[in-house]
Image (tube, rainbow, N blue to C red):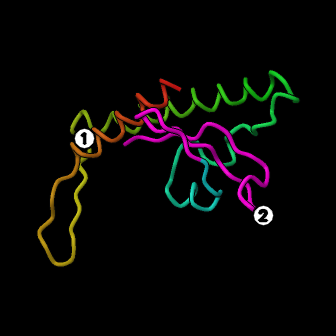
Amino acid sequence: MVARGIYRERNGWGNQHSARVKYDVGSELDMPEDRYKSRGYQPLFDQLPWKDADVRGLADLEDYARTIEADIAQFRVDLEPLESGKMHLRERIGDGAWVDITQREIDRKRERLQSTKAS
């Protein structure tokens, strides 16, 4: 399930800021800032527009659009060495054998790219 931050809200979760997250299945959920950050959602919490940003106008929306464009460009840069075979990723759990996870990471990055383009 791919999720993406939509906006942040001042003190929206008790005594801390919160983020609205939209999942690819269509549901949306509010969560505290620390949970948003620990789960690694994109864009970064500090790059999300504030819910009340409409009082600041178009400049915030333009900044947000630039952030999305930069995210898309970075996803493409990150994908190139994996897709071209110039770089491979492996992981090992405990003392087990090393396992190639390159395709899994390519798929994840493609999903994030598509999710980012959709927002």
Q: Which residue is mark 2?
A: 15
Q: Is residue 44 left or right of residue 26?
A: right
Q: Which residue is mark 1?
A: 86
Magenta-colored stretch includes residue 21: yes
Is the N terminus in the top left, top right, bottom left or bottom right quadrant?
top left
**Extreme residue in the right direction:** 55
Q: Is residue 57 left or right of residue 19?
A: right
Q: Which x, y percent locates residue 53?
A: 80, 33
Q: Magenta region's main secondary structure? A: strand
> Is there CB contact under 8 Å for labels 2 and 1?
no
Badge 1 crowding class, 10 Å Cα cut-off, few under 14, some 14 to 19, many 20 or more, is: few
- Out of 93 and 54, give the one closest to the viewer: 54
Cα distance between the residues tagged 2 and 1: 47 Å
Question: In the figure, 32 relative to 78: above or below?
Answer: below
Q: Which x, y percent locates residue 105?
A: 29, 45
- Out of 102 and 68, give the one closest to the viewer: 68
Q: Is residue 4 left or right of residue 32?
A: left
What residue do we see at 62% from left, 62% from top?
A: 34
What residue do we see at 54% from left, 40% from top?
A: 28
Badge 2 crowding class, 10 Å Cα cut-off, few under 14, some 14 to 19, many 20 or more, is: few
Residues in magenta, as a range: 1-29
The amino acid sitting under disc 2 is Asn
The amino acid sitting under disc 1 is Lys
What residue do we see at 74% from left, 52% from top?
A: 12
- Out of 7 and 72, give the one closest to the viewer: 7
Q: Which x, y percent locates residue 87?
A: 26, 45
Which quarter of the figure has residue 96?
bottom left
Disc 2 or disc 1, which is closer to the eye?
A: 2
Question: In the figure, 91 relative to 106: above or below?
Answer: below
Quick one: SS at disc 1? Answer: loop
